[in-house]
Image: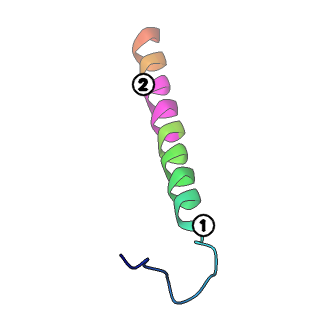
Amino acid sequence: MQSVRPDNTDPIPLRQSQQNVGTIMIRFVGLLAAVTVVLVLIWNR
C-alpha cells in the first residue's frame, strides 16, 4: 500500500470553520434576543 500525501506540507487553515462558528453564534444570539423581545411584548399586554 502506498501512503497518500499532499503536495505541500502547509497546515490546514482553520479560518473557515472559525468564521462559520462565529456566524452561527451571531445568528443564535440575534434570534434569542428577538424571541426575548417578542415574549416581553406579549407578557406586557
Q: Is residue 34 magenta?
A: yes
Count of residue discs: 2
Observer-nearest residue: 7 or 12?
7
34 w.r.t. 43: above or below:
below
43 w.r.t. 10: above or below:
above
Q: Quadrant of the N terminus?
A: bottom left
Three-letter amino acid code at the position of disc 1: Arg
Q: Please tell me which residue is depicted at 60% across the width and 71% down the height of the picture.
A: 13
Q: Please tell me which residue is depicted at 39% across the width and 15% down the height of the picture.
A: 42
Can you tell which quarter of the image residue 43 is in?
A: top left
The tag earlier along the polypeptide, 2 or 1, is 1
Q: Which residue is mark 1?
A: 15
15 relative to 1 in the view: left or right: right
The image shows residue 25 at horizontal and vertical percentages of 54, 44
Q: Please tell me which residue is depicted at 49% across the width and 24% down the height of the picture.
A: 36
Observer-nearest residue: 19 or 9?
9
Give the extent of the magenta segment.
30-38
Can you tell which quarter of the image residue 9 is in?
A: bottom right
Observer-nearest residue: 9 or 41?
9
Q: Is residue 41 magenta?
A: no
The image shows residue 32 at horizontal and vertical percentages of 48, 31
Callout 1: 10 Å neighbours few (<14), some, many (20+)? few
19 relative to 27 in the view: left or right: right
Q: Please tell me which residue is depicted at 58% across the width and 58% down the height of the picture.
A: 18
Q: Which residue is mark 2?
A: 38
